[in-house]
Amino acid sequence: MRVVFDTNIFISAFAIPGGNAEEAYLQAIQGTFELVTSVTILTETAGILRTKFEWADDKIEQFLQSVSRVATVLKTHPHLHVVQDEADNRILECAQLARADYIVTGDRHLLALQRHEQTTLISLADFLALIRKA
């Protein structure tokens, strides 16, 4: 199963340890599913960690290296305009290119789509329930 994490899932996994997002990331490390991301998603996440969480450059570099070891990192090209928030469109582009089964997100605008092409948009809690059943 191929899965794309929205930026908010990466932020929660790395900036707020011990929660469900970290559990989902650890499942990716264990190979429970194939994690796919993009340069754009990682760039946005790094920017948020730098500005909102005041992470130093070396800590951000560790984050990027960690994710790059676990996930397939794609280079996408902006072309979708499905939702108003352009950053959310970048998530959809990654899932489209990856042919992902799921996008895991906490973003209500994305969750409202429910599906985009072959990809199901799912909350973190629902995703964890799904992989625990597998």
Image (cartoon, rainbow, N blue to C red):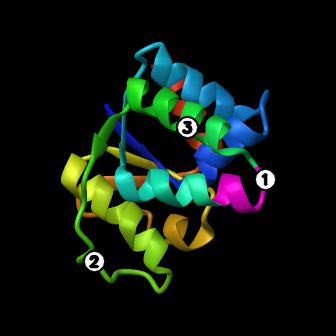
Give me the C-alpha separation between circle 1 and circle 2.
Answer: 31 Å
Q: What element carries label 1?
A: loop
Dot in front, 3 or 2: 3
Disc 3 marks a residue whose amino acid type is Glu
Of callouts 1 and 2, the N-terminal one: 1
Q: What stretch is highlighted in magenta?
A: 48-54
Q: Where is residue 23 in the image (x, y as percent from the top left)?
A: 65, 26
Give me the C-alpha separation between circle 3 and circle 1.
Answer: 13 Å
Picture quarter containing residue 117?
bottom left
Q: Is mark 2 on a helix, strand or loop?
A: loop
Residue at position x 77%, y 31% in the image? 17
Can see residue 28?
yes
Disc 2 marks a residue whose amino acid type is Leu
Label disc, if present, on residue 61 of the rendered structure: 3
Residue under label 2: 80
Q: Nearer the viewer, residue 3 or 94?
A: 94
